Image (cartoon, rainbow, N blue to C red):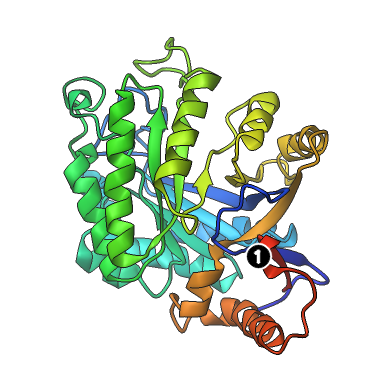
């Protein structure tokens, strides 16, 4: 696998530090592989009628991403598309014995081009997770909401969004030692108390399995053509309240992430309130250019003496623990070796300055 020439990444320590002046983000590229979804959430604009993406057409997109030094790819699919007869027929025609085999092939083709695959596909069974375990870096499994009243409204036609099922999926991943990104949506008519309930439930699983690598607070953004198209997004005050609760509830080893949601000024205010991670920022594969909002957001944050830093999509503790397969080690062992070297230098007293104040460490690829 090739290395970026003189490319400097930063590895997240996985310890939230409100005193840090760095704000992390992951430069990523997203591939929607199947938009057909067994759920039909009132707020989701992703739902569609597409056929599965032919795996080999993704190779060119991975190559384009690597030419821009993008390391992360997130494959997004509607939930359980294999429940539809036409999708099963197509996968069978292509020679895939199962939906999991299809997902594995997508991830493997990305890995072979030098990107680190993450899956955001909703519910996966323990068997399916075992099947893809050695080719994925992590899973993204959003809870969306723990509010039971949504089962009769926005999730009425979304059996996969049952809170208990989402937690069970997180538990499956924990037992298999798969790092997971999870979180909630804010502004879909859920009670504030339900946000706290979701946070506490996720924390309980993390204490048992130590596998939650970030908790995402996703502000609702109205989607064109959805039932909630005309609904107003949450106020900044509501997002701030949720951020404060998350920082109170989660320990330092579960960073809180709020993705970019269209306002530099609002995000800058959240950084002042303690946010230190904005998660994935996807490149525009149509133009081949990095998202322009990063440049503008960085200028805005620098006014408050903060700085955006690009990071790898894995926390230091999972590198140290070796929570990745032998196959992925071809891409990740370089960073793990560097971490061990840094640890040795610190133990021998060769590193200067108080380590506790350093949230992020530069690592050469």
Q: Can see residue 134?
A: yes
Which image quadrant: the C terminus? bottom right
Q: Can see residue 93?
A: no
Seen from the viewer's position, the closer of residues 103 and 293 is 293
> 262 above or below 349?
above
The image quadrant of residue 207 is bottom left
Residue at the spot x=61%, y=32% of the render?
A: 270
Seen from the viewer's position, the closer of residues 145 and 160 is 145
Which image quadrant: the N terminus? bottom right
Seen from the viewer's position, the closer of residues 20 and 124 is 20
Residue at the spot x=55%, y=73% of the render?
A: 112
Seen from the viewer's position, the closer of residues 191 and 348 is 348
Residue at the spot x=29%, y=23% of the render?
A: 191
72 left or right of 135 in image = right
> 236 above or below 339?
above
Q: Which residue is mark 1?
A: 356
| Few, some or many residues within 10 Å of mark 1 (<14, 14–19, 20+) | few
Residue sitting at the far top: 230
Image spot of residue 23 (x, y percent) = 68, 47
Image spot of residue 141 (x, y percent) = 35, 49
Image spot of residue 145 (x, y percent) = 30, 34
24 left or right of 44 in image = right
> 161 above or below 187?
below
Image spot of residue 219 (x, y percent) = 48, 29
Residue at the spot x=63%, y=62% of the render?
A: 71
Secondary structure beneath disc 1? helix
The number of discs equals: 1
112 left or right of 6 in image = left
């Amino acid at each position: 696998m090739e290395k970026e020439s003189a490319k400097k990444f930063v590895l997240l320590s996985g310890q939230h530090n409100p005193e840090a002046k760095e704000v992390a983000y992951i430069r990523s590229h997203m591939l929607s592989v199947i938009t057909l979804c067994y759920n039909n959430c009132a707020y989701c604009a992703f739902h569609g009628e597409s056929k599965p993406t032919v795996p080999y057409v993704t190779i060119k997109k991975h190559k384009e991403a690597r030419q821009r030094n993008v390391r992360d790819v997130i494959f997004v699919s509607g939930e359980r598309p294999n429940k539809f007869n036409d999708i099963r027929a197509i996968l069978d025609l292509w020679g895939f014995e199962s939906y999991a085999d299809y997902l594995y092939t997508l991830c493997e083709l990305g890995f072979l081009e030098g990107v680190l695959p993450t899956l955001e596909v909703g519910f996966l069974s323990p068997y399916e997770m075992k099947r893809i375990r050695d080719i994925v870096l992590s899973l993204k499994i959003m809870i969306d909401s723990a509010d039971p009243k949504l089962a009769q409204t926005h999730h009425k036609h979304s059996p996969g969004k049952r809170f208990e099922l989402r937690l069970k999926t997180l538990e499956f991943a924990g037992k298999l030692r798969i790092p997971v990104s999870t979180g909630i949506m804010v502004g879909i008519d859920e009670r504030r108390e339900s946000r706290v309930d979701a946070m506490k439930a996720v924390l309980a699983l993390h204490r048992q399995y130590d596998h939650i690598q970030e908790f995402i607070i996703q502000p609702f953004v109205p989607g064109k053509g959805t039932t909630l198209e005309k609904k107003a997004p949450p106020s900044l005050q509501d997002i701030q309240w949720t951020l404060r609760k998350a920082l109170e509830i989660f320990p330092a080893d579960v960073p809180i992430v709020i993705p970019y949601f269209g306002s530099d000024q609002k995000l800058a205010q959240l950084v002042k309130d303690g946010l230190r991670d904005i998660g994935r920022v996807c490149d525009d594969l149509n133009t081949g250019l990095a998202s322009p909002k990063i440049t503008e957001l960085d200028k805005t944050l620098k006014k408050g003496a903060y700085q955006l830093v690009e990071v790898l999509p894995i926390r230091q503790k999972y590198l140290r623990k070796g929570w990745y397969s032998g196959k992925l080690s071809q891409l990740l062992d370089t960073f793990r070796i560097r971490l061990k070297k840094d640890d040795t230098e610190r133990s021998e007293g060769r590193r200067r300055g108080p380590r506790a104040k350093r949230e992020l460490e530069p690592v050469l690829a």
